[in-house]
Image (tube, rainbow, N blue to C red):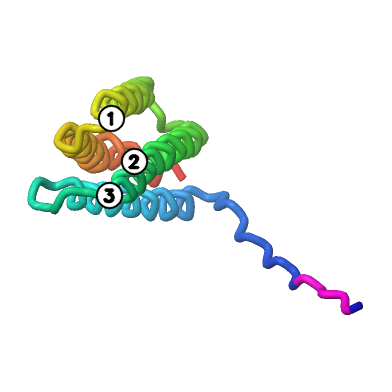
């Protein structure tokens, strides 16, 4: 009987410990979230052909994944900004409000392709405005303080 030896797993890269590296990781997450939003908007667009059941299920899963990734990103961003002393209560409140609105909008538009399209547009609008406004300001403060 042959024994199969598993390849040793490569150790994952450690979490960044300094703000410059943390900011770079957060920006990469921003870019991925922005790309995901754009792709989902394109796939929900009115010019796209009707979906089959498998497509609808896959897009439902992709929207759920977007919400999960957004939630994790915002939590990590808050944690690292707080550590830099740059997380104001308004920024945290904006995150909380946006997540609540995103979840309720997602649930409200369940099974409604046009409703989901409008939900994605609203989420994209908030995300881009927040990234260029509150996040940019907080990141600049964190860069200055680090």
Camera-side residue of 67 and 26: 67
Secondary structure mostly taken by the magenta-highlighted segment of the chain: loop
Q: CA distance from mark 2 to mark 3?
A: 18 Å
> Which callout, 2 or 1, points at the residue further toward the start of the chain?
2
Q: Position of residue 140 (x, y in %)?
A: 32, 43
The kind of secondary structure element at disc 3 is helix
Q: Residue 50 colored magenta?
A: no
Q: Are marks 2 and 1 in contact (CB under 8 Å)?
A: yes
> Which callout, 3 or 1, points at the residue further toward the start of the chain?
3
Q: Position of residue 93 (x, y in %)?
A: 35, 21
Q: Which residue is mark 2?
A: 60
Q: Position of residue 79 (x, y in %)?
A: 50, 34
Q: CA distance from mark 2 to mark 1?
A: 8 Å
Q: Position of residue 49 (x, y in %)?
A: 14, 53
**Range of magenta residues:** 2-6
The quadrant holding residue 2 is: bottom right
At 42% from the left and 42% from the top, the residue drawn is 69
Q: Which residue is mark 3?
A: 34
Above or below — where is 92 with respect to 129?
above
**Numbered circles on residues, count:** 3
Foreground disc of the pair 3, 1 = 1
Left-right relation of 22 to 34:
right
The quadrant holding residue 139 is: top left
Q: Are marks 3 and 1 in contact (CB under 8 Å)?
A: no
Instruction: Kindly identify which numbered label has been placed on residue 110.
Output: 1
Mark 2 crowd level (few <14, some 14–19, many ≥20, 10 Å Cα): some
At 30% from the left and 50% from the top, the residue drawn is 55
């Amino acid at each position: 009987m042959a024994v199969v030896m598993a390849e040793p797993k490569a150790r994952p890269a450690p979490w960044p410990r300094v703000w410059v590296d943390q900011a770079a990781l957060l920006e990469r997450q921003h870019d991925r979230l922005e790309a995901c939003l754009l792709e989902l908007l394109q796939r929900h667009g009115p010019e796209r052909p009707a979906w089959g059941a498998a497509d609808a299920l896959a897009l439902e899963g992709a929207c759920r994944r977007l919400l999960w990734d957004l939630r994790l990103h915002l939590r990590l961003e808050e944690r690292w900004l707080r550590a830099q002393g740059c997380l104001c209560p308004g920024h945290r409140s904006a995150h909380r409000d946006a997540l609540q609105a995103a979840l309720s909008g997602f649930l409200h538009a369940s099974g409604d392709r046009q409703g989901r399209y409008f939900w994605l547009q609203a989420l994209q609008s908030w995300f881009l405005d927040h990234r260029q406004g509150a996040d940019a300001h907080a990141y600049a403060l964190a860069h200055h303080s680090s």
